Image (tube, grey):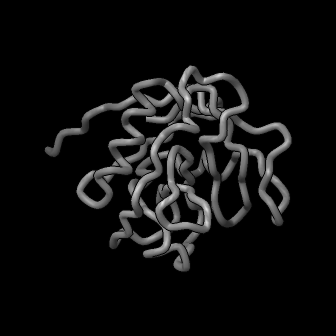
Amino acid sequence: MMELELGSVTIRLFSDLAPKHVERIKSLVQARFYDGMPFSRVIEGFMAQTGNPIKETGLDYLRLPTLTAEFNSLPFERGTVGMARSRHPDSASHQFFITSARAGYLDHNFTAFGKVTRGIELIDQLRQGPPETGTVAHPDVIKSITFTTIRAV
């Protein structure tokens, strides 16, 4: 559950498809790393990215080992959550993004590990940056992220 000023966004994580990436996200959430984190890159019709701190987080995120890519069958469609990385496939660490539209060229090129199940319209409402870079001057921030267990009925 990701709390924004605009409301709540629910994200389902797929540990069966990307176990190491989900474990990294879980550990960072438990360390409250993402609390107060900005959506520093938002490109209309593409994605919103977070995980690049603008303040001290209490965690030396630059020393986190990079993750080996876990490419899988989850398509990058509206609401897919993926791990950001450099040009090297095995360079993901702590930044993630949420796609706001189908981005098929990301399929099998970036690790998808989650899906927004409620609140995607709030991602659409985040302040956006210019189309070239997506860098947001005054970004919206994540108030908090917490875990809840949803049981099958």
Q: Residue at x 68, y 36 (%)?
A: 38
Q: Position of residue 41 (x, y in %)?
A: 72, 51
Q: Position of residue 22 (x, y in %)?
A: 35, 47
Q: Residue at x 81, y 53 (%)?
A: 129
95 to 103, vertically: above or below: above
**Taking 43 as reference, is 116 left or right?**
left
Along the line of sight, the residue nearer the viewer: 5 or 68: 68
Residue furthest to the left in view is: 153
Q: Quadrant of residue 113?
A: bottom left
Q: State the count of labels.
A: 0
151 to 82, vertically: above or below: above
Along the line of sight, the residue nearer the viewer: 85 or 129: 85
**Taking 22 as reference, is 133 left or right?**
right
Q: Residue at x 53, y 73 (%)?
A: 106
Q: Identify the image quadrant of the C terminus.
A: top left
Q: Residue at x 38, y 69 (%)?
A: 71
**Taking 96 as reference, is 115 left or right?**
left
Along the line of sight, the residue nearer the viewer: 145 or 10: 145
Q: Identify the image quadrant of the N terminus.
A: top left
**Taking 34 as reference, is 55 left or right?**
right
Q: Position of residue 147 (x, y in %)?
A: 35, 31
Q: Position of residue 93 (x, y in %)?
A: 50, 48
Q: Quadrant of residue 62?
A: top right
